[in-house]
């Protein structure tokens, strides 16, 4: 079967992982890379000599053999580049956050629909053998009626990003959009059988008094229909990378945990436990878990969506919801009040 041709826009720390996965994929071929930084372009040429490497992403959009464009850029560039990709008739895989405003997200969804192209958003946790197994167990009724979720991250500070963009609030939007967005998506996914979220109340605190907009500590309570709720919490003031998801229901509980020296480790430790109301059992996790592994599933899923026309696992609607939840959470932080969706 013919491999799906991919172009990559952005060859930074995470973009280089995307390039590696596309290059190694059984269903994908890396045909072109756009990267503004000269040093990164040189590295891209050395590691992927078969790919055309250019400075301006627009040079890639007219190449006929490219079916999918994978965008791994600072968040403030997502809308501009994503619209150009879709208008060029290419399928779009967009790193999270999908964009910085709900309006920009709607633009992307509508552009994909108008072009008849697939739009997928990089919430790779939905491809995880660990976090995905939690979803399977919830859907199978392992905890009865799901009632409560705690999704927590304890980690070291964020990387600066190219030109320090991640610490520039104008380019990052807010730090809720940077990583807690994954946890909002997980909570909505886990409770999807109960309906979309109703409201959010959030608090945040920065370590550096000179930069209160950079909120290292963040917690939110998200209400779902029927009194169900999720607590989402993160600190960037700690060490290593430790994530937990705990869910309880009317008939049991689940506890999933993942730990690594950093988020992109190839050697994490993880477990999943299920309590059925009587005993606790360890649930086998079928494969290694971690974003470097889930990225391969995400890329393969995008290739399948492009080839078959079936929707990707994380659609533009899902990406829009995730951004909307984060923006409402920031509104709650700013006003000190609960905010309805």
Image (cartoon, rainbow, N blue to C red):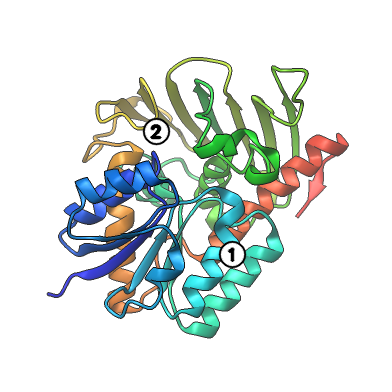
Quadrant of image for the C terminus: bottom right
Residue occupying the point 20% across, 46% down: 47
Is 42 positioned to the left or the right of 258 in the image?
left
Q: Earlier in the sequence, mark 2 or mark 1?
A: 1
Q: Is residue 19 above or below residue 117?
A: above
The answer to whether residue 37 shows anywhere in this view is yes
Residue 120 placement: quadrant: bottom left
The residue to which callout 2 is attached is 276
Q: Position of residue 234 (x, y in %)?
A: 59, 27
| CA separation in Å, label 2 and label 1 | 49 Å
Q: Is residue 229 above or below residue 306?
A: above
Residue occupying the point 46% across, 79% down: 88
Residue occupying the point 54% across, 84% down: 114
The residue lying toward the viewer, choosing from 165 and 139, is 165
Residue occupying the point 64% across, 37% down: 175
The residue lying toward the viewer, choosing from 76 and 110, is 76
Q: Which mark is residue 80?
A: 1
Single out the residue that lies furthest toward the front.
38
Residue 131 placement: quadrant: top left
Dot 1: within a 10 Å radius of its alpha carbon, few (fewer than 14), some, or many (20 or more) residues? few
Q: Is residue 110 above or below residue 317?
A: below
Dot 2: within a 10 Å radius of its alpha carbon, few (fewer than 14), some, or many (20 or more) residues? some
């Amino acid at each position: 079967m013919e491999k799906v041709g991919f172009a990559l826009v952005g060859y930074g720390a995470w973009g280089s992982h995307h390039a590696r996965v596309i290059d190694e994929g059984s269903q994908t071929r890396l045909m072109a890379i756009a990267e503004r930084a000269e040093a990164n372009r040189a590295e891209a040429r050395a590691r992927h000599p078969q790919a055309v490497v250019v400075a301006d992403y627009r040079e890639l959009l007219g190449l006929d053999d490219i079916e999918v464009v994978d965008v791994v850029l600072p968040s403030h560039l997502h809308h501009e580049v994503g619209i150009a990709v879709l208008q060029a008739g290419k399928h779009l895989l967009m790193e999270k956050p999908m964009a910085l405003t709900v309006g920009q997200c709607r633009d992307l969804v509508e552009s994909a629909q108008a072009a008849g192209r697939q739009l997928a958003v990089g919430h790779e946790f939905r491809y995880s053998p660990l976090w995905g197994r939690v979803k399977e167990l919830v859907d199978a009724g392992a905890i009865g009626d799901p009632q409560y979720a705690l999704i927590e991250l304890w980690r070291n500070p964020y990387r600066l990003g190219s030109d320090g963009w991640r610490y520039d609030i104008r380019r990052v939007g807010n730090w809720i959009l940077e990583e807690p967005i994954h946890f909002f998506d997980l909570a909505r996914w886990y409770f999807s059988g109960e309906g979309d979220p109703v409201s959010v109340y959030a608090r945040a605190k920065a370590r550096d008094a000179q930069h209160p907009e950079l909120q290292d500590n963040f917690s939110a309570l998200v209400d779902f229909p029927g009194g169900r709720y999720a607590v989402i919490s993160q600190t960037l003031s700690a060490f290593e990378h430790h994530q937990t998801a705990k869910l309880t229901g009317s008939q049991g509980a689940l506890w999933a945990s993942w730990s690594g020296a950093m988020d992109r480790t190839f050697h994490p430790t993880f477990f999943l436990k299920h309590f059925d109301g009587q005993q606790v059992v360890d649930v086998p996790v079928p494969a290694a878990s971690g974003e470097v592994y889930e990225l391969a599933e995400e890329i393969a899923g995008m290739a399948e969506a492009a080839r078959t026309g079936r929707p990707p696992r994380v659609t533009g609607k899902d990406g829009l919801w995730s951004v909307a939840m984060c923006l409402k959470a920031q509104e709650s932080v700013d006003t000190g009040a609960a905010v309805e969706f």
